[in-house]
Image (cartoon, rainbow, N blue to C red):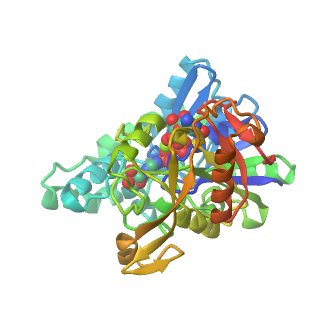
Amino acid sequence: MPALVLLGAQWGDEGKGKATDLLGGSVDYVVRYQGGNNAGHTVVVGDQKYALHLLPSGILSPGCTPVIGNGVVVDPSVLLSELSGLNERGVDTSKLLISGNAHIITPYNVTVDKVTERFLGKRKIGTTGRGIGPTYADKINRVGIRVQDLYDESILTQKVEAALDVKNQILTKLYNRRAIAVGQVVEELLAYADKLAPYVADTVLVLNQALEEDKVVLFEGGQGTLLDIDHGTYPFVTSSNPTAGGACTGAGVGPTKISRVIGILKAYTTRVGAGPFPTELFDEDGDALRRIGGERGVTTGRDRRCGWFDAVIARYATRVNGLTDFFLTKLDVLTGWEQIPVCVAYEIDGKRVEELPYSQTDFHHAKPVYEMLPGWNEDISKAKTFADLPKNAQAYVKALEEMSGAPISAIGVGPGRDETIEINSFI
Ligand code: GDP
Ligand code: IMO
Ligand code: MG
């Protein structure tokens, strides 16, 4: 004790990187438990900005041990370039631990991701093209390559052969692509073995021992609740479990160890890629949120789709994650609107619906029912306490808290570490 989970309550990009970094100074371990380099977590420290894809945001806190758990999918080339990029900027990355059970994103997984999206045409998911889905598919199909396989050439060769057997048939016969040579893949993967060796560890043992010694462990989710393979807007989701349960399976820590689950919640909503989004705006308000909020993908550079806050989604996130707290981010972006619409329910086929419909068809037809909240014009970026916020901003936060079903324990008023109002302490 205590183990905390920090995860996205919407469709990703809620500000998890900033929140994790903020807590990084008070925790002993920060653990990524799912996803891979589809994530893009931004951390701003002073005048320095870092974009992290695979490394836990705790890597920027010197006292903290960053861990890549068994549930993560690792592209070794991306990992090594992220490490060297940080080293060049003077960040010590030597404490990093990587689970030997984490699966490797191979070059053919990246190829299959891109080819499949192209093949889907209009029905594509809008993936990040980083090989995430195909790597998790191989894991579930039991033809995946794990980090530990890099240390047994014969096993690695057999596994790559097994994985490519079917894939080469599909690539050549269905997609009209060239077959991928086993030897070439094995050679490329083996070249990473020595470079990764210092970091590979039995992370399940390390983390459980740390918890027994009363160390503080923070689990940092990638993506968000609505991108969860089980609880998200399937099929427009990622191929892993960013929701709280994923922290247990993706790090090998039992649910009884988790003491707090913090949902990172943007004061409005964004989404990247395809899929339903009831409060999406196609007008100048949407453009303004995108411009003021800097809503452009950290990983793919795509413009994010923007819309008003959706309390139905926030309530759903509270429920499926068992959230104990929210960290509300980007409240400053809403400064300047006379009135701010907040979606309190949906209208589906003429009926008012208070909770997220389980039917995908219904969700596609959901129209937001808005309540108008009064806005504010004062600059809030220097606010240090809740009382420093203008009355209408306070009322906006309180209304969101009431609708979302868990206390808002911190509020982001800017991208920097210091631009945060802490209401309840997390640790
Ligand atoms: P993540 O994927 O959840 O870590 O979020 P991203 O880094 O993809 O996107 C969040 C963006 O919002 C980043 O550019 C952050 O620097 C920025 N950000 C985080 N919190 C705040 C905040 O409270 N206010 C403002 N203005 N920007 C924030
Ligand atoms: P962070 O951690 C926002 C989206 C993609 C696509 C879908 C599936 O920065 O919040 P994938 O490549 O995972 O198979 O793509 O999921 N997606 C994200 N959207 N933030 C992310 O990460 C995302 N990671 C994946 O845009 O719609
Ligand atoms: Mg992001």
Farthest right residue in view: 213
Question: For residue 22, what is the image quadrant?
Answer: top right
Q: Would you say 92 lies left or right of 355 here?
A: right
Task: In this rendered view, identify the residue nearer to me: 348 or 68.
Answer: 348
Q: Total number of numbered labels?
A: 0
Question: For residue 326, what is the image quadrant?
Answer: bottom right
Taking the spot 67% from the left edge, 32% from the top edge, the residue there is 419
Taking the spot 34% from the left edge, 58% from the top edge, the residue there is 163
Work out whether residue 154 can be spotted. Answer: no
Work out whether residue 10 can be spotted. Answer: yes
Taking the spot 49% from the left edge, 77% from the top edge, the residue there is 353
Picture quarter with the N terminus: bottom right
Image location (x, y in percent) of residue 297: 41, 40
Image location (x, y in percent) of residue 98: 60, 43
Task: In this rendered view, identify the residue nearer to me: 47 or 291.
Answer: 291
Image location (x, y in percent) of residue 198: 62, 34
